[in-house]
Image (cartoon, rainbow, N blue to C red):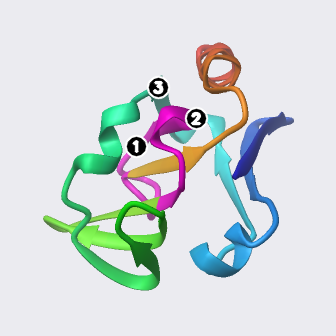
Amino acid sequence: MAVIRVQGQDLVVEMAGLDKVWAHKSKLTIPLAHVRGATMDPGVLGEPKGIRAPGTHVPGLITAGTFHKDGEKVFWAVRDARKAVVVELTDDERFARLVVEVDDPRAAVALIERAASR
């Protein structure tokens, strides 16, 4: 699971527990100016992921790490699709989007949308 917070002019996404190991990342810091928006998307887990490098993928259990598809890099950290939040990023970032599981998807989307619109 990820914890999302706004720190100054940055969006900080921090992996909790074993997600740090599975995703091969403990924290991502993205300038708010590079955040296009966020949505809840429980269906995202069913989409093709592409090539995993590095990361963990056990269908039906966990998708975590960096996945490459159609020239884009997407960061995943999801076990429960019902709690998935998709954060769309600008071309200035190394990832096109972040797909992370959070405790409260509605609150996370509201936080991101509010902060990105400033």
Return the x and y of residue 104 as percentages of the image width and height.
Answer: 70, 26
Return the x and y of residue 22 as percentages of the image width and height.
Answer: 61, 77
Q: Which residue is mark 2?
A: 33
The residue nearer to you, when weighing 115 against 56, is 56
The three-letter amino acid code for the residue at tag 2 is Ala
The residue nearer to you, when weighing 1 against 53, is 1
Q: Which of the 4 image quarters holds residue 36?
A: top left
Determine whether 106 is above or below 60 in the image.
above
**Residue at (18% x, 68% y) in the render:** 71
Q: Quadrant of the C terminus?
A: top right
Residue 90 numbered mark, or none: 1
The three-letter amino acid code for the residue at tag 1 is Thr
| Left or right: where 95 falls relative to 83 | left
- Describe the element under mark 2 as helix, strand or loop: helix
Verify CB contact (< 8 Å) between mark 3 and mark 2: no
Disc 3 vs disc 2: which is toward the camera?
A: 3
**Residue at (86% x, 35% y) in the render:** 8
Q: Which residue is mark 3?
A: 40
The Cα–Cα distance between marks 3 and 1, rounded to whole angstroms, is 18 Å
Return the x and y of residue 111 as percentages of the image width and height.
Answer: 70, 20
